[in-house]
């Protein structure tokens, strides 16, 4: 089977696919997080993997990132669209905002984060890890749909599964990072190594602990986080529905080179 576009997200995204077939996949890096569903969105062939497994049982530091990207690469995927929950490190990045991430800072450790770990020595360029063409398309579709969004964002990726201390969070905010998350790395870097275009759509669910103390940036309650998240999953699903059919057949970005 083949697919031109890959989607990684929560299980709620499964319903995006028309006429989906689930297949069991194995790679030289092991099995991906879930079975791979292959179906159509607006006539385009799309494969879907649930990042944390179908029962949401895989924590961020145990996600088989290499197997997920390898599975997509083996299916012929050239573009990957992902969604991820994120905490805000800046008051301008409000709960409910979508963030078209353009940079990451890696603070994770102990993860298998490269395909080039033996034999040939290859240093992948990582200056612009996110696909500029997909980002622009996402931004213009988000504008058309009147969504609240941020055109760019630097995500600091922490290992988890624990959240940050107040001091860690304040430190990240002082560095000028915009949002914080546990899964963008090494996912985006591995896609880069495979020369696959990658788009990361962050969903701001709450303000991180370092922003507490300011009346405007009070952390929302857990219930509110859940509400913000499920409401936004629907927004991202409709965004993906409008983005996928408009992805150009030919790639005009720099992602084909590493
Ligand atoms: Zn690209």
Image (cartoon, rainbow, N blue to C red):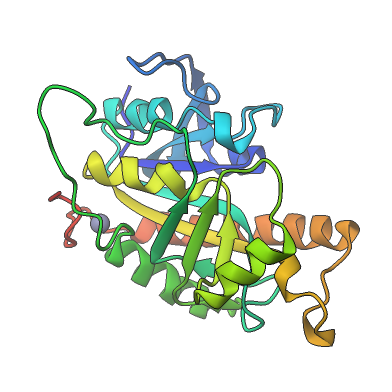
- Counting from the top left corner in percent of width and height, residue 241 is at 51, 55
- Counting from the top left corner in percent of width and height, residue 140 is at 42, 76
Q: Residue at x 15, y 50 (%)?
A: 256
Q: Using the rendered view, name the quadrant where residue 13 is placed.
A: top right
Q: Using the rendered view, name the quadrant where residue 104 is placed.
A: bottom left
Say if 83 sits above or below 204 in the image: above
- Counting from the top left corner in percent of width and height, residue 238 is at 58, 59
Say if 40 sits above or below 240 in the image: above
Q: Choose between 162 and 205: the one closer to the eye.
A: 162
Q: Choose between 165 and 103: the one closer to the eye.
A: 165
- Counting from the top left corner in percent of width and height, residue 176 is at 50, 77
Q: Residue at x 24, y 27 (%)?
A: 117
Quadrant containing the N terminus in the rendered view:
top left
Which of the four quarters of the rendered structure image does ligand 1 lie in? bottom left
Q: Residue at x 19, y 23 (%)?
A: 118
- Residue 42 in sight in this render: no
Q: Residue at x 33, y 28 (%)?
A: 70
């Amino acid at each position: 089977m083949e697919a031109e576009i890959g989607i990684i997200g929560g299980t709620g995204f499964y319903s995006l696919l028309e006429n989906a077939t689930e297949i069991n996949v194995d790679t030289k890096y092991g099995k991906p997080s879930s079975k791979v569903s292959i179906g159509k969105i607006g006539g385009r062939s799309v494969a879907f993997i649930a990042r944390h497994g179908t029962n949401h049982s895989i924590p961020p530091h145990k996600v088989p990132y290499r197997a997920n990207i390898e599975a997509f690469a083996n299916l012929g995927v050239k573009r990957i669209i992902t969604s991820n929950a994120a905490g805000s490190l800046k008051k301008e990045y409000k709960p409910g905002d979508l963030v078209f991430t353009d940079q990451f800072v890696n603070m994770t450790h102990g993860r298998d984060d490269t395909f080039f770990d033996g034999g040939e020595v290859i240093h992948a360029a990582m200056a612009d890890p996110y696909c500029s063409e997909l980002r622009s398309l996402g931004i213009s579709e988000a504008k058309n749909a009147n969504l609240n969004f941020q055109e760019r964002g630097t995500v600091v990726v922490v290992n988890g599964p624990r959240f940050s201390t107040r001091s860690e969070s304040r430190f990240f905010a002082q560095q000028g990072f915009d949002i914080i998350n546990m899964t963008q790395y090494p996912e985006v870097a591995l896609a880069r190594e495979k020369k696959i275009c990658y788009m990361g759509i962050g969903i701001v669910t709450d303000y991180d602990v370092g922003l507490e103390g300011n009346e405007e940036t009070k952390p929302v309650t857990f219930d509110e986080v859940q509400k913000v998240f499920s409401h936004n999953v629907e927004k991202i699903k409709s965004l993906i529905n409008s983005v996928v059919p408009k992805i150009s057949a030919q790639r005009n970005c720099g992602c084909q080179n590493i």
